[in-house]
Amino acid sequence: MLLPVVGLLALAVCGMALLAVSTARVGLQAELVGILAALLPVGPVVAAFLWIDRWEPEPARLLWLAFGWGACVAAITALLINNTAEAVGDMLLGKGNGDTISAMVSAPLFEEFVKGAFVYGIYLFLRHEFDGVIDGIVYAGLVAAGFAFTENIYYFGRAFAEYGIGDGTSPGVITAFILRGVLSPFTHPLFTACIGIGIGLAARSPKRGVVGLVGGYVAAVVLHAAWNGAATLGGGTAFLTVYFLVMVPLFALAVWFITWHRRREQRIIAAALPGMVAENLILDNEVEALARLDARRKWRKRVRARSGRAAAGLMAEYHAAVSELAFLRHAAAQGATGRHDVSESHLVAVVRATRQAAVRASAR
C-alpha cells in the first residue's frame, strides 16, 4: 500500500516543480493561458488511445499513472537533461549552438528513453497487465500525451508572454496552437508508440524481444530527431517537407495498423467464442453480443439502466475477461509465449467468476 502513495507523491512533487519553473519563466498570466490552450488538444489524443483499448481495457489507475509519468516525471527529467545539454553545447561550441544540441541529440535520446521506461516497467513488473502490441501502443501513447501536455503548457505560455495572442499569421498563441495543437498533436505519441510496439513484440515472443526493444527505441529517436531537426535547422520549407512527406504518411500508416489490429482482435474473439460455449463458460445467446464492441456497449448500457453503474462495471469486467482468454488461447495456438505469469486455467476461472458476479448484479 505504501508504494502507490509514494508514487503519487513523487508525481505531485514533479508536477508542482514544473509548474513553478514554467511560471517563473513566463509569468502567471501566460502560464494560465498555456494551461487552457494545452487542455484543448490533449482531450482528443487521450480519447483516441482509450478508443484503441476498448476490447480489453487496461486498468484506469495505470492509464492515469502513464499520463502522470509523462506529464511529470518524463517532463522534469527532460527539462533537467536538455538544459544541461544546452549549457554544455554553448560552452563547447559557442553561444546559440547548445539549443541545437539539445533539440537534435539530448531531447530525442533522453526524452524517448524516459517515456519508454514507464512502458518497459509495466512489461517487467506488471506483466499481467501487458498482453502485446496494442497494450504497448496505449501505454506509450498516454505517456507521450502527458509529456506533450506539459510541454505545450510552456510553449503556449511562452508564445503568449513574448507575442500575445497573435492572429495566426504572426507569432503568438494562435500560431503556436495551430502548429502544435492542430497540425501535430500526435507527434510525441507517434514517436513513443514505436517503443510500445517493440515492447509489445517482446511480450509475445522473447525471441524477438531484444530486436523489438532496440528497434522500437531507435525508431522513436530517429523520428524525434528528424522532427526536431526540421524545426530547428531546416526552416519553414524543410519543416513542411518533413511534415507532409514523413510524418503525415507515418501517422496514416499508424492509423491503418491500429484499425487493422482492432479488426484482427475482433476476429480472434469471434473465433474463440464457440469453444467457450462448448465449455459452458458463456451462453450461446451471448455470442453475438460478445463478438462486437457496439453490441457489448449496448449490453452494458441496458444493464446500467436496469441495475445501476456497479452492475455495468461487473459486466465490463466479464467482457474484458472473455477477450483476455480469447487472446491468450490465440497466442498459444500461434506458438507465441504470451503472458508467462497467467495460465489458461486461471483465466477460465476469471471468466466464470466475472460472469457469475455480473449475472447476480444484473438480476437485482
Image: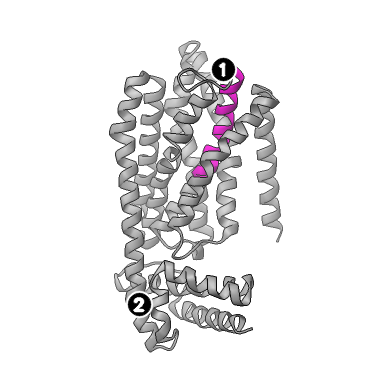
Horizontal and vertical percent for residue 143? 52, 46
Mark 2, other Cα within 10 Å: few <14 / some 14–19 / many ≥20: many
Using the numbered discs, state the Cα–Cα distance from disc 1 to disc 2 in whole angstroms.
59 Å
Q: Amino acid at mark 1?
A: Tyr
Give the position of the C terminus as an image quadrant.
bottom right
Q: Secondary structure at mark 2?
A: helix
- Residue 117 visible: no
Residue 21 - label: none
What count of labels does the image hold? 2
- Asked whether 258 or 43 is in front, the reply is 43
Residue 272 - label: 2
Residue 135 placement, left or right of 34: left
Residue 24 placement, left or right of 211: right
Horizontal and vertical percent for residue 351? 49, 79
- Residue 335 visible: yes
Horizontal and vertical percent for residue 313? 58, 70
- 151 part of magenta stretch: yes
Residue shown at 60% from the left, 77% from the top? 306
Residue shown at 32% from the left, 41% from the top? 250
- Seen in the picture, residue 234 relative to 56 is either above or below; the reply is above
Residue shown at 35% from the left, 82% from the top? 274
Circle 1 sits on which residue? 163
Q: Which numbered mark, 1 or 2, is in the foreground of this view? A: 1
Residue 335 placement, left or right of 7: left
- Seen in the picture, residue 197 relative to 324 is either above or below; the reply is above
The chosen color scheme is one colour
The quadrant holding residue 293 is: bottom left
- The first of marks 1 and 2 along the sequence is 1
Horizontal and vertical percent for residue 25? 65, 22
The quadrant holding residue 332 is: bottom left
Main secondary structure along the magenta-highlighted residues: helix
Q: Which residues are magenta?
A: 143-163
